[in-house]
Image (cartoon, rainbow, N blue to C red):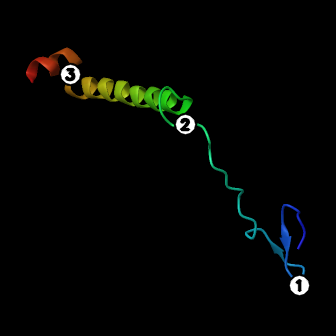
Amino acid sequence: MTSRSYVVEEQNRLNNYAIEPKMYVDQNPGFGFTEYAEKLNGRLAMIGFVALIAIEVFTGHGAIAWLTIL
């Protein structure tokens, strides 16, 4: 077996599934304003905004009307 990006078995059959990805541990702290947290917050805000527009389209009431009903 060699260090190529593929493995050949004993009978010269190609074995693509023998190589596992290299694992690593991220040493950066996961608290505070990290890049991941900012991306996640932005994506959740976009989902919420689209959901708010969809609710307004389907019900005919805006966000203010929903807040006054409660």
What residue sits right under mark 2 in the picture?
A: 29
Whole-angstrom CA distance, mark 2 to mark 3, is: 45 Å
* Mark positioned earlier in the residue sequence (2 or 3): 2
Q: Residue 61 vs residue 2: left or right?
A: left
Q: Amino acid at mark 3?
A: Gly
In the rendered image, the residue lying farthest to the top is: 64
- Mark 2 is surrounded, within 10 Å at the Cα level, by few (under 14), some (14 to 19) or many (20 or more) other residues, namely few
* Mark positioned earlier in the residue sequence (1 or 3): 1
Q: Amino acid at mark 1?
A: Gln
For residue 58, above or below residue 16: above
Quadrant (top left/top right/bottom left/bottom right) for the C terminus: top left
Q: Residue 26 vs residue 32: left or right?
A: right
The answer to whether one can see residue 62 in this image is: no
Tag of residue 60: 3
For residue 28, above or below residue 9: above
Camera-side residue: 38 or 25? 25
Q: Position of residue 65 (x, y in %)?
A: 15, 17
Quadrant (top left/top right/bottom left/bottom right) for the N terminus: bottom right
From the viewer's perspective, is the residue at label 2 or at label 3 nearer? 2
Whole-angstrom CA distance, mark 1 to mark 2, is: 48 Å
Dividing the picture into quadrants, the one containing residue 55 is top left
- Mark 3 is surrounded, within 10 Å at the Cα level, by few (under 14), some (14 to 19) or many (20 or more) other residues, namely few
Q: Residue at x 20, y 21 (%)?
A: 60
What residue sits right under mark 1 in the picture?
A: 11
Q: Residue 15 vs residue 28: left or right?
A: right
Camera-side residue: 37 or 8? 37
